[in-house]
Amino acid sequence: MSLYHNLLDFFFPRTCAACGRRLAEDEASLCVPCIRGLDRVGYGGKDEHGALERLFWGQLPIERVTSFFYYSGENHQNILHNLKYFRRKEVGQDVGAMFAEELLDSGFFEGIDGIVALPLHKKKRRQRGYNQCDYIVKGICRVTGIPVIKGAVERVVNNASQTRRSTIERKENVEGIFRLKSADLVAGKHVLLVDDVLTTGSTLISCGRELAKAPGIRISICTLAYAGEFGNGK
Ligand SMILES: [Zn+2]
């Protein structure tokens, strides 16, 4: 580590995005115990019955779906909060890259032509200053070498936070909030759609339906966290 980095680390210590402990020199965003302790969904493992894929059956031309870890417990939630609300964009990139590395040998990325980040509404993006999903995508691209597809779809309705709504309300609330901007960018391709958290899947379905207006498209989905009922945190 250079003197500059030593000083920087002294005055602004880098901390684990999950537990808040100070990071060692060779750790990025998460400390080793937190990486080990992640409650993984496990593509092709615990999720062997394709429970996450089933959320999208009959809704989208869906190929594969997975999440990295269960959104359960304070440490897991801290990772997402740091990425989304505390401007720690590098967390998206670092954890996205870890996720991709663990998935590499599973065949999950096989045949995927391009990656689309779930878009934020312009207004929300201005407020936050960035789209957290762009950073998860960067991490995945760094590991897989799959190109990013930008500008295929946009969010046209800036709906309020859905955390307190019931499933039925959520489903109604997400109709028509995205718009396919450029079908040419995704037509005939197998596209990976990336979001930070998967709950009922309704937002991803809404975005995926717009993408599916492009002829011959196939869609896979991955998110950092899974906050739905399947697995119940275990
Ligand atoms: Zn930690």
Image (spheres, rainbow, N blue to C red):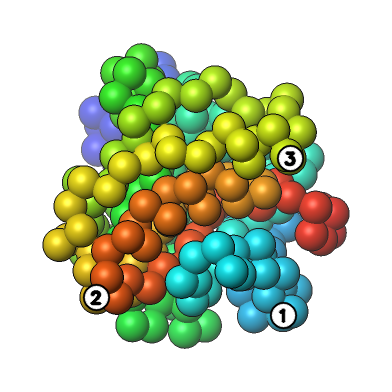
- Say if residue 163 shows up in the picture: yes
Q: Which residue is mark 3?
A: 167
Q: Is residue 106 left or right of residue 117?
A: right
Q: Is residue 213 left or right of residue 193?
A: left
Q: Is mark 1 within 8 Å of ligand 1?
A: no
- Residue depth check, mark 3 versus mark 1: number of the one nearer the observer: 3
Mark 2 crowd level (few <14, some 14–19, many ≥20, 10 Å Cα): some
Q: Are marks 2 and 1 in contact (CB under 8 Å)?
A: no
Residue 20 against residue 196 in the figure, above or below: above
Sequence-first tag of 2 and 3: 3
Mark 1 crowd level (few <14, some 14–19, many ≥20, 10 Å Cα): few
The structure residue drawn at horizontal position 43% and vertical position 55%, both measured from the top left corner, is 209
SS at mark 1? loop
- Could you tell me residue 75's position as x and y percent? 70, 38
The tag on residue 39 is none
- Could you tell me residue 30's position as x and y percent? 55, 45
Q: Which residue is mark 2?
A: 188
Q: Which residue is mark 1?
A: 48
Residue 110 against residue 128 in the figure, above or below: below
Residue 59 against residue 29 in the figure, above or below: below
- Say if residue 30 shows up in the picture: no
Question: In the image, what residue type sits under mark 2?
Answer: Gly
Work out whether residue 7 or residue 70 is closer to the camera in this orientation and state it.
70
- Could you tell me residue 97's position as x and y percent? 41, 58
The structure residue drawn at horizontal position 24% and vertical position 75%, both measured from the top left corner, is 188
Question: In the image, what residue type sits under mark 1?
Answer: Glu
